[in-house]
Amino acid sequence: MDSFVCDTCGTVWPPSPAPPAACPICLDERQYLPPGGQRWTTLSAVRGGHRQGFHYEHRVLAVAPEPSFAIGQRALLVRSPGGNVLWDCVTLVDRASAEILSALGGIDAIAISHPHYYSAMADWSAAFDAPVYTHADDAGFVVNKASEHRFWEGERLEILPGLTLIRCGGHFEGASVLHSAHEPGGALFTGDVLQVAPDGEHLGFMRSYPNYLPLGAAAVRRIEAALDGLEFEAIYGAFWNRVIAKGGREALARSVERHVDWVTRA
């Protein structure tokens, strides 16, 4: 049997003879269903209509289907001496992906920022025999668990030496980022928990991007506090060309102040 895929968010369901009734990720107020309601495609259709794109973003290899599919995020291969992490996920996983990433040392763990990017996490896990880390606060949105699925709890978790998950909350209760101590000056991988703006100098903080719901001041201050004590120069966002290459700590500070100023004005 084929696996059905939500055409709007790219989440892959376990193989079944008929599509699910609806996608709970897209029924949530942070996502949406398009006019006309729920739409489904299949994993085989995605594989037939897309190829995997590989491009370096600053210092890190990024992976995403071409042409773009669903939300359009990219996954990032975060390499380290102690092992490699696939940060966030995309719907397409194919032989080319397996061969290219295996040649770069493979994938030792998969970590995902929040439910919008769960996509084909179980398939990626099976392809590389790698555990998947998602925060337990978002467990209700998992519709296709990996065979080795680790719901982590708390505020921080080092999944490999020098690679640490931090729960920031805000966008989702369990929304998390990944900190690498191995990149020069340190680096943050943020998905859109902290969204890198097009200018490459600021960050955005939203409960819902498609529905234009900003986070309040207290939530943004909590994100800032969650990152206290971490050193980072680079910040890698969710989409192509969304990277702050240097001065990441300063970019966070000025972005928090700008956001809080606007949402607290009368």
Image: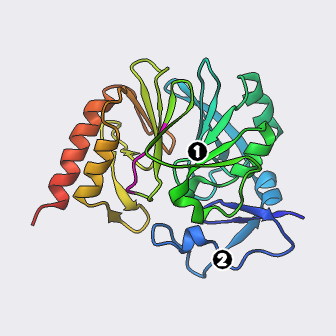
**Element carrying mark 1:** loop
To which quarter of the image does residue 155 belong?
Answer: top left
Image quadrant containing the C terminus: bottom left
Observer-nearest of 251 and 158: 158
For residue 187, above or below residue 194: above
**Element carrying mark 2:** loop
Q: x%, y% of residue 208? A: 41, 63
To which quarter of the image does residue 4 belong?
Answer: bottom right
Q: Which residue is mark 2?
A: 22
- Stretch of the chain drawn in magenta: 165-170
Residue at left 77%, top 37%?
A: 128
Most distant residue in the front direction:
154
Q: Amino acid at mark 1?
A: Asp
For residue 97, above or below residue 191: above
Residue at left 69%, top 52%?
A: 91
Q: Amino acid at mark 2?
A: Ala
Q: x%, y% of residue 104? A: 71, 22
